[in-house]
Amino acid sequence: MLLNQGYEVIGLDSNLYERSTFGTGIVEIPEIKKDIRDVELEDLTGIETVLHLAGLSNDPLGNLNPNLTHEINYLASVKLAQLAKQAGVSRFIFSSSCSNYGAGGTDWLTEESAFNPVTPYGVSKVKVEQDVSQLADDNFSPTFLRNATAYGVSPRLRFDLVLNNLVAWALTTGQVYIKSDGTPWRPIVHIEDISRAFIAVLEAPRDLIHNQAFNVGRNEDNYQIRDLANIVKEIVPNCQIEYAPDGGPDKRCYRVDCSKIAQTLPDFQPQWNARKGAIELYETYQKVGLTLEEFEGPKYQRIAHIKYLMGHDLLDENLRWKKSTLAMQI
């Protein structure tokens, strides 16, 4: 999407999931193959804007080793922002999360609402926002995009995300499998619309986005998990809703007000909703012939894939590639 808008894009990634491409569609761009913890000043020379999304990307993976989540998601992110400022980067757009609100209850939450994270992942996002906001000045402008829970088809599709997961279960087993009691509220947003939010901030006048946080999504896209399950049941033929026998209420419950981004950045025009997204997922899963073994296996399950790489002596306990692996990549 950035390339289509005429931007020159450079990627930086440690490529933990290079073996996990779903279908086709990875766009070729210049890439720095490096761990976010190892970024140096020279990596940022000449860069005008940093769009920072790197990190351990979900709660089970964050729980695998909370110290690593602290080191990668928090310390390395703040260091990146400090280096970006030193290198003359003018805008720093951070992929934060509505996980900041955590156990937020059923009241509507705005960007001014209290943080209440309940996972190492959520804590890390809060701490980055707090520290990086202190770096803001006339030459360095950070913005914090608190994304709702992502969904939708992409070349690095994640099956641990709620709508992606429910559709996969329904297609491969005939069950829309819910691991909680179905009552928690959760805002969701398509990955394309998250990308639209980044571009809208990138192109907005500085005074509108300088050191600001924005909830990313739409108010009408706050759903209880059971509502998402019903949508999936209506779209995937011959499936039934099934609740896990030990599924209790999930502490992660929040309804997020996204009025600010709609009012401040009118160029941000989300194109997706849960029903449209569930249809996209169902049709794509059908097209590729997705099986239960595949989506539940180590190729696409984030934490299982990390354990697979460790078990095959490719990755060490600190999530760094072993030297023999790096030699092979070169």
Image: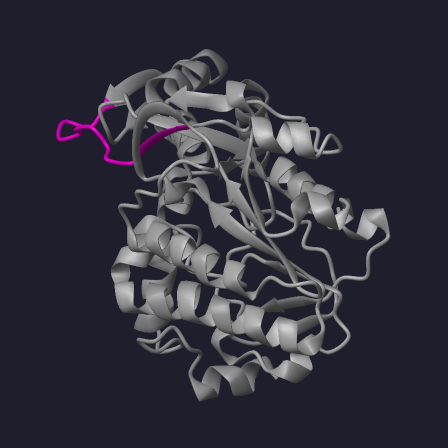
The image position of residue 324, as x and y in percent, is 46, 87
Please identify the residue farthest to the front as the structure is shown: 138
Front-lying residue, 322 or 56: 56
From what the image shows, is residue 121 above or below residue 289?
A: below
| Residue drawn at x 41%, y 15% as measured from the top left | 233
Q: Residue at x 78, y 47 (%)?
A: 203
Q: Position of residue 91 (x, y in %)?
A: 69, 60
Query: In the image, 240: left or right of 128?
Result: left
Outermost residue, left direction? 246
Seen in the picture, residue 234 relative to 288 is either above or below; the reply is: above
Magenta span contains residue 224: no
Q: Position of residue 72 (x, y in %)?
A: 41, 68
Horizontal relation, residue 51 to residue 220: left or right: right
Q: Give residue 329's position: percent from left, percent from top.
A: 58, 80
How is the structure coloured here? one colour
Image quadrant for the C terminus? bottom right
> Which residue is more in the foreground, 38 or 91?
91
Q: Give whichever of 239, 34 is nearer the camera.
A: 34
Residue 310 figure quarter:
bottom left
Q: Is residue 244 visible?
A: yes
Q: Which residues are magenta?
A: 243-255
Q: Main secondary structure of the magenta part?
A: loop
Give the residue displayed 38% in from the left and 43% down from the top: 99
Residue at x-position 75% and y-position 46%:
1
Q: Is residue 43 left or right of residue 248?
A: right
Q: What is the quadrant of residue 306 in the picture?
A: bottom left
